[in-house]
Image (tube, helix red, strand yellow):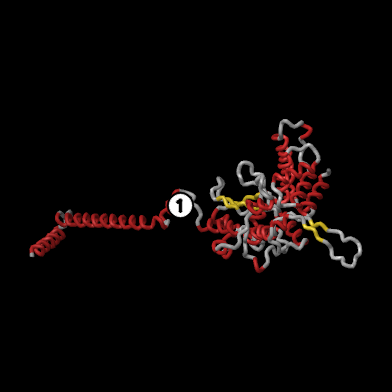
Amino acid sequence: MGDNNYRTRIASELLDSVPSSLGSYFKVYDNLIARGDAHVLQIEDPKLEPEHTSPITHDDILLAAEILRGDPTLTLDQASEQLRIRLRTACSTRQSTLTILLTVRAMLMLEADRTGSGNGWRSSECFVDFASRYIPKASAMSVAVMGALEDRKAMKAWKLKARFNLSFRGTDDLARHLLLDPLHPDGPTLYLFHHAAFLKSQLKRLRRQNLQGEENILTCLKTQVAVPARPSSPILIPQLTMISGCFPPRLLAETLHSIQTILFHFDDDRSSHILERLITKEGFDEHCSQADGYNTLSDAHQLEYRYWGERFAALYRFTHERPPRNKLERWMKWQSAESNAFVVAVAALVISILVGILGLGLASVQTWIAWEAWKTPVSNDDETTALLQEIAELLRQQRGR
C-alpha cells in the first residue's frame, strides 16, 4: 500500500478529511503504528508460531474503527473478540486488544492504554462509558469557572509566560488538554492539545451530519444512517451511511476556542509570537494559528466551558496563588497566611516592645554621656569652663529646692 494511498484512506474513513491538511496528525499516527508493531512483536504470546504474529495494519485499524462505531456500548473485551473473529487470521487476544486501543487513539486522539495506571479503558467497561469518564462533562459551570472566564484576559499566553514563567508543552492526548503541572522540573508547565486540524475536521464532519448541536456522546460516537427523502420513487430507497466516531461538538469547540481565543488570540501579537515559536520549534500544529473564521462556540454560549472549565479555574488560581519559588517567597507566603495572623500580630507586638526598651536604653546612655561631659569639661577655654560651672551650680541649686 503506497504512502499516499493509506493516508488518503485513513483521512477519509477516520476523519472524513484529506491528508494534505493533517500533517501533524499523521506524525502521531505513523509513530503509533510503528510502536504498535514493535509492542506486538516484543510481548506477544511466545507459544504462538512467529508467522502467526503479524504487524498491525491500516486495514486492521479501519476494521476496529468500524466495530467501535457500529456499537459504542461494547466493552473492551467484546470489541477485541469481535475484531479477532473478523480478522479471520491467527490472532491472539492480546494483539486484537492492542489494535482496539490503537484505534481509539487514531479515532479520538485519546490514550486508552494506561497499563498499570488504572486510568485506561478497563476490560469490562463500555467504550462510551470510558470516553465519558475520561473527559467528563460538568452539568453546569461553577462559580470558580465563571470567575476565571470573566477575567480570561489574565490568561493570555504572554502574561502567563512573562509574569509566572509558565511554559507550554504539546500533548497528543486530548484528555491532557489544559493540564497544569506547577511542579514540573523545568518550571510550571501547561499542556495543550495542539492538533487543531484534527479538531476542525471533526467539527466539519458533525456539521455535515447535522450534529453540530448534539450533546449526547453516544450519538456522536455511533455510525449514523440516513435515508434520503424520495417519496415519489417506487423503487427501494437506499440508505446513506454517515460515518461518525467523534466527540461531542462542544468538547471539540471548547478545545479549539481555548487555544485560538483565550490563550493565543489572533489579535494578540505578543501571544501570537509565542504560538509561532511553538509551531516552528516545538512541533505544534500550524493550524493553531489559522482561526479560519470559525465560530467555534455560539455567541450565546461563548463563555460556557463544560469540559475544560475546571482546568481554566485551576490555571486562574495559579495566577493568583503561584507557589513560592525560593526560601524568601516561602517565608513571605507563610507570614501572609490567614492561619498565622495571630502569631504574626504577637510577634509584631514583642518586637515593638523590644525596640522601645532598646530606644529607652540608648537615650539613657546619651543622657549619662552628656552629664559626664558637663562634670568633666575638656575645653581649655577658661570662659567656657566658668560658664559651664555656673550652669552646673544653678542646676544643683534648682535640684536642692
Given residues 294 and 211, the one toward you in this image is 211
- Residue 385 in picture, x, y percent from top left: 14, 58
- Left or right of 304 on screen, residue 331: left
For the residue marked with disc 1, what is the amino acid? Glu
Image quadrant for the N terminus?
top right
Given residues 344 and 273, the one toward you in this image is 344
21 in relation to 93, above or below: below
- Residue 313 in picture, x, y percent from top left: 56, 59
Rendering quarter of residue 145:
bottom right
| Residue at screen point 77% across, 61% down | 209
Image quadrant for the C terminus?
bottom left
Q: Find numbered disc 1 in the image and state the secondary structure of the residue it sits on.
A: helix
Rendering quarter of residue 154:
bottom right
- Residue 324 in picture, x, y percent from top left: 48, 51
| Residue at screen point 23% across, 55% down | 361
Q: Residue furthest right?
A: 234
Q: Residue furthest bottom?
A: 300
Rendering quarter of residue 44:
top right
45 in relation to 16, above or below: above
